[in-house]
Structure formats: C-alpha cells, structure tokens
Amino acid sequence: MMPIREYLEEHYTDDNIKDEDSVLKLVIRSLSQVVQSGAQNIEISVMKIGKTRKLGLEEVEALLKLVEDERVAAEAEEAAKKKPMQQ
C-alpha cells in the first residue's frame, strides 16, 4: 500500500477533478489504498460554498463497488493486451 499523498501525486489529472463524481472516485481510490475494511471505515463529506453534505454508507459502498469494478476491468484489459495472440 502506498500513502495517500503519494497516490494522489501519481494519479492526479484534470480528468480526475472535472466534476464532483470524478473527484469522489479519486478520493475512494486513494482511501482504498490505506483502508482495508471497506465502506464502514470511510467517511466522506463534500463541502461547497454555503453547504456541506456527508455521504451515507450506501453511497460510499456504491462508489467503492464502482471503483473496484473499474479496477477489475482495467486489469482484465491490460492482461488481454499482454496475452500473446493465439493462431
């Protein structure tokens, strides 16, 4: 596992901060690097001028599942690229 700061420095791009959903996925990916036990140990609040919103457990779980599904798909795609072409 890498520290969150190192992860963010390595994975920060303009695409990762283009909207709230992208930022939340980046946050979940970075936190999942240091939190092993899942959504029950993650608390996230979204702060905007004049209001704050705390994500519920269900929303955090859904984001974790989405990020995990994207990771698995990316790994499968990478493995397919590395697999030699069979004739």
Image (spheres, rainbow, N blue to C red):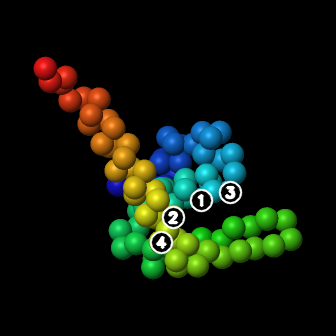
**Residue type for callout 2:** Leu
* Residue 84, above or below 7: above
Label 3: how many Cα within 10 Å (few below 14, some 14–19, many 20+)? few
Determine the secondary structure under disc 3: helix
Cβ atoms at labels 2 and 4 below 8 Å apart: yes
Determine the secondary structure under disc 1: helix
Q: Tell me the CA gap for discs 1 and 3.
A: 6 Å
* Residue 84, above or below 25: above
Residue position for label 3: 20
Residue position for label 1: 24
> Which residue is rendered at x = 55% and y = 72% of the image?
59
Q: Position of residue 2 (x, y in %)?
A: 39, 52
Q: Tell me the CA gap for discs 2 and 3.
A: 12 Å
Q: Tell me the CA gap for discs 4 and 3.
A: 17 Å
Q: Can the viewer see residue 38?
A: yes
Q: Which mark is residue 61?
A: 4
Q: Position of residue 52 (x, y in %)?
A: 75, 73
